[in-house]
Image: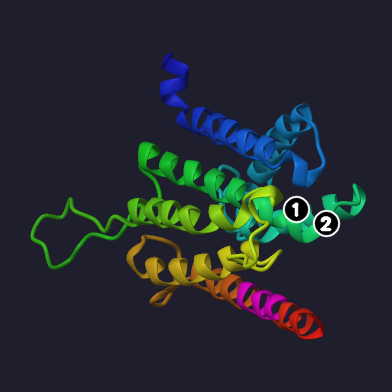
């Protein structure tokens, strides 16, 4: 019990893996996998995600114990596309299904930031008490919760999407998430303590890149969707 108390991240990642496994089981028909395959994919998703956030932090020049959530944001979709190609699955559906898994995993990681006391917000200068800081971590968790309420209805199994109109175009969920996350992180970084480039942080650059990629892919998908509708 003491070990768990001293290492909350492991428990949170286990929770994220369980939630991801449940979601993948619900969507196993769309992915054409069995229940054991959904569980295995959830475990691999968490393990590879941890590697990616550490690798990205290393590329930024941080120490070996640091992590950067942008590693998951940028690298995980490449893994989704590779897996879809290797196992001959629809890449757009794969990305749609795994988007909530990605968000839940990052949310668990940010909860750990609160428990471990890292990634704090700047002190609120106009308040006399120097112990009160901007609740950047809490706001990011709230952002994830709101995003899930938007994303999940658009990533329901195919048997729930037989309505005449769909909320989202197929394949748009992950780029939509990237664009929204880019906007959120760009704003919130002004209130966080981080390595800075003047008033900007290195994360501002990654946030802009995430926004641009997400926005560009969303535009491309929307354009293809309109063309297909026009042909019909």
Q: Residue at x 91, y 51 (%)?
A: 88
Extreme residue toward the top, this view: 1
Residues drawn in magenta = 214-222
Above or below for 142 versus 20: below
Number of callouts: 2
Quadrant housing the C terminus = bottom right
Element type where label 1 sits in the image: helix
Q: Is disc 2 placed on a helix, strand or loop? A: loop
Which secondary structure type mostly characterizes the magenta part of the structure?
helix
Q: Quadrant of the N terminus?
A: top left
138 to the left or right of 80 = left
Q: Residue at x 75, y 53 (%)?
A: 94
Residue that badge 2 annotates: 90
Figure check: 8 above or below 180: above
Front in this rendered view, residue 60 or 113: 113
Give the alpha-carbon distance from disc 2 to disc 1, as whole Å.
6 Å
| Residue that numbered label 1 is attached to | 94
Identify the residue shown where x is 56% and y is 71%. 179
Q: Residues within 10 Å of mark 2 (few under 14, many from 20)?
A: some
Q: Nearer the viewer, residue 13 or 171?
A: 171
């Amino acid at each position: 019990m003491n070990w768990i108390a001293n290492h909350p991240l492991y428990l949170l990642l286990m929770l994220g893996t369980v939630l991801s496994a449940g979601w993948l089981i619900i969507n196993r028909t769309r992915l054409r996998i069995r229940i054991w395959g959904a569980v295995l994919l959830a475990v691999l998703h968490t393990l590879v995600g941890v590697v990616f956030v550490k690798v990205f932090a290393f590329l930024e020049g941080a120490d070996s114990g640091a992590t950067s959530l942008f590693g998951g944001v940028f690298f995980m979709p490449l893994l989704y596309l590779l897996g879809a190609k290797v196992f001959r699955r629809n890449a757009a559906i794969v990305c749609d299904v795994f988007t909530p898994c990605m968000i839940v995993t990052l949310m668990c990681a940010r909860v750990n930031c609160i428990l471990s006391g890292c990634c704090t917000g700047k002190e609120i200068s106009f308040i006399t008490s120097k112990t009160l800081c901007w609740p950047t971590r809490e706001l990011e968790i709230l952002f994830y919760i709101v995003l899930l309420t938007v994303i999940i209805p658009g990533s329901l199994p195919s048997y729930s999407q037989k309505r005449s109109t769909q909320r989202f175009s197929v394949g748009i969920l992950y780029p939509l998430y990237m664009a929204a996350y880019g906007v959120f992180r760009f704003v919130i970084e002004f209130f966080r303590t981080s390595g800075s480039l003047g008033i900007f942080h290195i994360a501002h650059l990654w946030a802009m890149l995430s926004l641009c990629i997400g926005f560009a892919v969303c535009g491309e998908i929307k354009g293809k969707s309109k063309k297909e509708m026009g042909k019909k």
